[in-house]
Amino acid sequence: MKRLIMASAIAASLVFAAGAMAHGDEEHGKKEEQSAEDHAAALGKPGDPRKVTRSVNVEMNDAMRFRPDSIRVKRGETIRFIVRNTGKVKHEMVLGTIEELKEHAEMMRKFPEMEHADPNQVSVEPGMTGELIWRFTRAGTFDFACLVPGHFEAGMVGKVRVGR
Ligand SMILES: [Cu+2]
């Protein structure tokens, strides 16, 4: 049942994202760009591993912090986040808008054993390193967070600033 709930939530967000992508990135007015920023597709799309332009190292720790917690990229860059968990509990890095992350954190609190594997997130066991490849197609400030129950609430969040 829990899986079902999450599966349909993911399906809904995928449909949403696919619709936004079909519009294309380039030739649209500011208005649409603004409204697109309200959901996941606003921050880009899963990156092609063959087209990575830069790697960024990120550490996650049991102080409930990302290091760095502020990352700058250029619009159009495909970033390989190399995410190392130096703590003793599992952590994860999930890209999204702060509203989505809040909603997702709420769901994780209700269903703490929920596992998920979306292209905008990577879960990393203690002492391990994971990777997340993302292409940032829009300028703006986006967020990332650890959605292991309690971590988001403890301030395990960061920002990606995408410049033109
Ligand atoms: Cu965490």
Image (cartoon, helix red, strand yellow):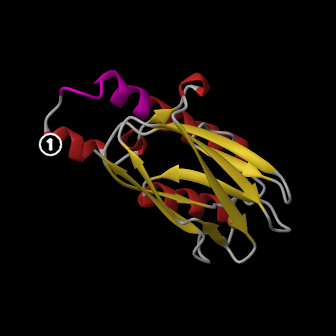
Residue 120 showing in the rendered view: yes
* Left or right position of 78 against 35: right
Magenta span contains residue 20: yes
Q: Which residues are magenta?
A: 16-27
Give the residue type that dot 1 points to: Lys
- The residue closer to the viewer here, 29 or 132, is 132
Side of 33 relative to 20 (left or right): left
Horizontally, residue 156 falls left or right of residue 17, namely: right
Q: Is residue 59 magenta?
A: no
Residue hosting label 1: 31
Residue 163 at what x, y percent from top left? 32, 49
At horizontal 42% and vertical 33% (from top left) the residue drawn is 17
56 to 126, vertically: above or below = above
How packed mark 1 is, by other alpha carbons closer than 10 Å (few <14, some 14-19, many 20 or more), is: few
Q: Secondary structure at mark 1?
A: helix
Residue at 38% of width from left, 46% of height from top?
A: 39
Q: How many marks?
A: 1
Does the beta carbon of the residue at mark 1 sit less than 8 Å from ligand 1?
no
